[in-house]
């Protein structure tokens, strides 16, 4: 096989992996617009209906870290294919579901399959594209899929639900999953893992998976139980104890599931901290913005999807066309900070949106800035998160940054939604929509404050951009921070 054919095969393999990622990301939001139809047909109550979403999020958030390490141990392609098989089979079960229990159980299996599939993709991409410029471009493609998939999910869900039925938001995954698996078998090289003997820590896996799943469950129950309830405090304390027990175990066993040496990397630690701070604002804008459009401005589910379409387009243009050059020529940290600044401005603009908002005047600018922010933030942050990890820990680093995003998003959404609800209930107004809008405004302001905190961490904790300091030196082979470099 010639060098040109090998290079072409790598890029086709990248697109195959990204299709798998797109399916996973779509399923986090595609269900939202179909919930009224599901409720009517299967007889869900309003409170029970939330579990159609929660079952997926609990499994997805709980298994990401374990899935990433399994990729390092037994081979990333193997874990990807296993996850894809579980996700595809679970999607079929979801579409065939004729009862509440069957749908919720199948959604849990979908979350497990999604965690196995998505946790190893970034690690495979880094291995496939070791050269800095190509790697930045490949991560830009991945980041576009990961960030724009939520907006696309609203649009696709609205179209399928209105044109056919809610069952097809799940059935559509079956042929896509099968084709993706067949192409992955042909195009993605199978690399052996380092072996289960290097980190098959089953007690540790049980601790961290149980802790993360319980944390996500606790957070998702805050809206009903309240932050100060015995349930929230008790389960939250137990989840913290489980995760603390996991870290204590990792520090003292010879072959840990998650080597703590990874956190000695200034880049890995700093990028995960920024991810934790930025995801509440990003997902808060996306989901609360959708509620604002649908609940206060009267948009239909399909119109909400179309309203967010400019964000997807801008994300695509930046992630696929410019992010790679910006990361290489100006540095990942500068690109990240620019994206965070755009995201902050987007939240601040939406925090002043009135009840009688006109889309072109009051909503379009925040939506476009959302696309700009995501199109710059995610490629830069994914590059930084993987830069400080060794090849043997690439799957772990990939699972870690995805876990951080999921936990940050879940915690952030719970926090912002709770604050918005409390402000709305505590505000005296003859028009309940005025009080509701006031709650959204406060939530967006908190999201903006967290973004600013992310900028501060990025500037203080992440290493300076060598590409930016040395002009175009990166094109001549300037190396990034060594793996596990000690922070000064």
Image (cartoon, helix red, strand yellow):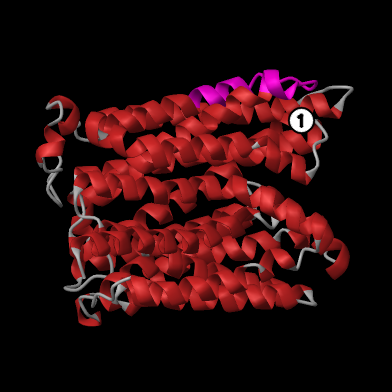
| Residue 277 lies in quadrant | top left
Q: Is residue 415 visible?
A: yes
Judge left or right: residue 481 versus residue 462: left
Picture coordinates of residue 421 (x, y %)?
71, 37
Frontmost residue, 14 versus 78: 14
Question: Magenta region: which residues?
Answer: 344-362
**Residue 348 falls inside the magenta stretch:** yes
Count of residue discs: 1
Q: Is residue 200 visible?
A: no
Identified at 80% across, 24% down, the residue is 434
Q: Is residue 351 magenta?
A: yes
- Residue at 49 percent of width and 38 percent of height: 315
Q: Is residue 93 left or right of residue 74?
A: right
Q: Secondary structure at mark 1?
A: helix
The residue that disc 1 covers is 436
Q: Which residue is pictured at 20% across the width and 46% down the height?
A: 132
- Residue at the spot 16% in from the left edge and 73% down from the top edge: 254
Rendered location of residue 436, percent (x, y):
76, 30
Residue 139 vertical placement versus 332 (above, below): below
183, above or below 475, in the image = below
Using the image as rendered, state which of residue 246 and residue 305 is in the foreground: 305
Q: Nearer the viewer, residue 293 or 198?
A: 293
Where does the image place residue 51, in percent across and percent down from the top left?
A: 69, 63
Q: Is residue 60 left or right of residue 401?
A: right
* Neighbours of disc 1 within 10 Å: few (<14), some (14-19), many (20+): many
Residue 152, compared with residue 6, is above or below; it is: above
- Of 358 and 36, nearer the camera is 358
Q: Quadrant of the N terminus?
A: bottom left
């Amino acid at each position: 096989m010639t060098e040109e054919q090998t290079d072409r095969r790598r890029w086709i393999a990248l697109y195959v992996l990204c299709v798998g990622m797109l399916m996973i990301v779509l399923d986090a939001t595609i269900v939202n617009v179909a919930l009224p139809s599901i409720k009517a047909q299967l007889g869900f109550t309003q409170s029970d209906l939330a579990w159609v979403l929660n079952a997926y999020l609990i499994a997805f958030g709980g298994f990401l870290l374990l899935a990433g390490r399994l990729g390092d141990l037994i081979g990333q392609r193997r874990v990807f294919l296993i996850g894809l098989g579980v996700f595809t089979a679970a999607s079929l079960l979801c579409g065939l579901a004729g009862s509440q229990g069957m749908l919720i159980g199948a959604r849990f299996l979908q979350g497990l399959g999604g965690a196995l599939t998505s946790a190893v993709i970034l690690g495979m991409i880094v291995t496939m594209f070791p050269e800095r410029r190509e790697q930045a471009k490949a991560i830009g493609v991945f980041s576009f899929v990961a960030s724009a998939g939520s907006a696309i999910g609203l649009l696709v869900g609205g179209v399928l639900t209105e044109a056919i039925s809610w069952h097809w938001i799940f059935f559509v995954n079956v042929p896509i999953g099968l084709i993706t698996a067949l192409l992955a078998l042909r195009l993605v090289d199978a690399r052996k893992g380092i072996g289960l003997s290097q980190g098959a820590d089953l007690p540790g896996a049980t601790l961290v998976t149980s802790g993360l799943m319980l944390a996500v469950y606790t957070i998702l129950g805050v809206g009903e139980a309240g932050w100060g309830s015995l349930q929230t405090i008790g389960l939250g304390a137990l989840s913290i104890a489980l995760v603390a027990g996991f870290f204590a175990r990792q520090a003292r066993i010879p072959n840990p599931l998650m080597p703590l040496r990874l956190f000695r990397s200034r880049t890995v630690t700093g990028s995960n901290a920024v991810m934790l701070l930025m995801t509440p604002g990003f997902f808060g804008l996306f989901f609360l913005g959708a509620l604002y459009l649908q609940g206060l401005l009267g948009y239909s589910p399909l119109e909400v999807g179309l309203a967010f379409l400019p964000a997807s387009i801008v994300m695509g243009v930046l992630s696929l066309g410019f992010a790679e050059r910006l990361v290489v020529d100006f540095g990942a940290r500068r690109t990240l900070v620019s994206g965070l600044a755009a995201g902050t401005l987007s939240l601040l603009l939406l925090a002043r949106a009135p009840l009688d908002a006109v889309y072109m005047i009051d909503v379009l600018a925040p939506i476009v800035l959302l696309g700009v922010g995501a199109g710059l933030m995610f490629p830069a942050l994914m590059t930084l998160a993987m830069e400080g990890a060794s090849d043997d820990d690439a799957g772990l680093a990939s699972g870690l940054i995805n876990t951080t995003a999921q936990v940050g998003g879940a915690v952030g959404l719970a926090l912002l939604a709770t604050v918005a609800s409390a402000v709305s209930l505590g505000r005296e107004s003859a028009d309940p929509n005025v009080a509701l809008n006031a709650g959204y405004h406060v939530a967006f302001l908190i999201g903006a404050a967290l973004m600013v905190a992310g900028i501060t961490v990025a500037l203080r904790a992440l290493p300076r951009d060598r590409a930016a300091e040395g002009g175009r030196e990166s094109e001549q082979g300037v190396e990034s921070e060594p793996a596990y470099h000690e922070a000064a």
